[in-house]
Amino acid sequence: MKIISKITNAIIIGALILGVTSCSDDDDGNIIIPENNIVVTATADTDLSLLVTALAAADGDLVSVLSGAGPFTVLAPTNEAIQAYLTANNYADINAIPTAELQQLLLNHVIPGEFSSTALTNSGAGYENTASTAGPNGSAISIYYNTTSGVVFNGGATVTTADIEASNGIIHKINAIIELPDVTTFVTADPEFSSLVAALTAYNFDYVNTLKGNGPFTVFAPNDTAFDELLAVNDNWNVPADIDETVLSNALNLHVVPDSNIREADIVDGNLTTLSKEITVNATAKTIKLAGNDDASASTIIATDVQATNGVIHVINKVILDLPSINPN
């Protein structure tokens, strides 16, 4: 782990500022001052001083990266947000964070491309990829945003100051560090999975702890519409916890393929072994079903490649069932 003292950090940032903002004369004798990039803009904001220190301390020469052409959208945690993270994780200061981990953590706050608050709000909610490559096999990590109540990322970091323009992108200040996600991060952050969360936590199931593990896991995640269809099978089922424990457990097991990070490009025809039985994949139709069942029972993959550090999520529109165990009405 490399140690960056305050003096060394000041020299690095000072050199950057001098290099980027050095003046030159044009033919008319007028001074030309280059526009401020993201790093220079952040350096000028005292509320982002810890972020600038972190950029200089991390592996990967992030100061140069974020001084590059871009464009980038940087979700910039304030000093208060970074200090809260340090305290919560028992770090004395930024230099106590292993520099490789710090690199990936910071890159999880960088979205390639420029996304204004207006563009995000108009979209409502969705996923983008960050610059972090902390996923299995170097996969780019996803980030979820929801604008129902402010602009919130991964269910926990809210934009407090939006649309700070820089020459190579845009900065949004946020009130919390966006930690690298596991698959449960997205399941709990995205309200489209509220019924899935209820199912995973019913009957004191241990699925949440399992899916926080090292993995990797490929998760075929039914959305709320899929669960609504399942609950309609039985008049006594109003919420997932109304489903018999064995039936629900058997169903949930069919949605997790352990020891795999199967992204959309790697989905092929054939069978996959889940936590219980095999499921059959039709790559062309983008469907999955319990092996041996007819096509009418198949679920369609409607969104792909929500990437976490310990696995990938694909959204499906029907709960996969072990049909012989279902006893409707």
Image: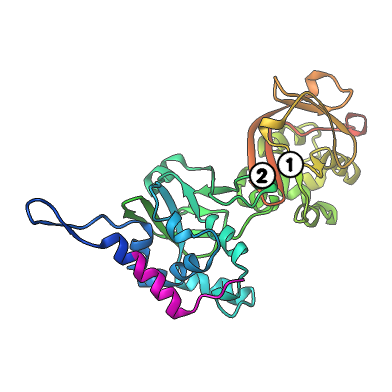
**Relative to 94, is 289 on the left or the right?**
right
What is the three-letter code of the residue carrying label 2?
A: Phe
**Relative to 80, is 324 on the left or the right?**
right
Residue visible at 45% across and 79% down? 6
Question: What span is colored magenta in the figure?
Answer: 1-16
* Residue 267 colored in magenta in the image: no
Label 2 crowd bin: few (<14), some (14–19), many (20+), radius 10 Å = many
**Residue 56 in view in this figure:** yes
Q: Is residue 152 above or below residue 288?
A: below
User: Which badge, 2 or 1, comes first in the chain's sequence?
Assistant: 2
Residue visible at 51% across and 69% down? 57
Q: Nearer the viewer, residue 173 or 113?
A: 113
What is the three-letter code of the residue carrying label 1?
A: Asn
**Element assignment for label 2:** helix
Residue 242, numbered circle: none
Q: Nearer the viewer, residue 34 or 210?
A: 34
Residue visible at 78% across and 23% down? 269
Residue hosting label 1 = 261
Label 1 crowd bin: few (<14), some (14–19), many (20+), radius 10 Å = many
Q: Are marks 2 and 1 in contact (CB under 8 Å)?
A: no
Residue visible at 39% across and 71% down? 47
Which of labels 2 and 1 is toward the front?
Answer: 1
| Magenta stretch, main secondary structure class | helix
If the image is split into quadrants, where does the N terminus sit? bottom right
Quarter of the image where one finds residue 273: top right
Residue hosting label 2 = 193
**Residue 148 in view in this figure:** no
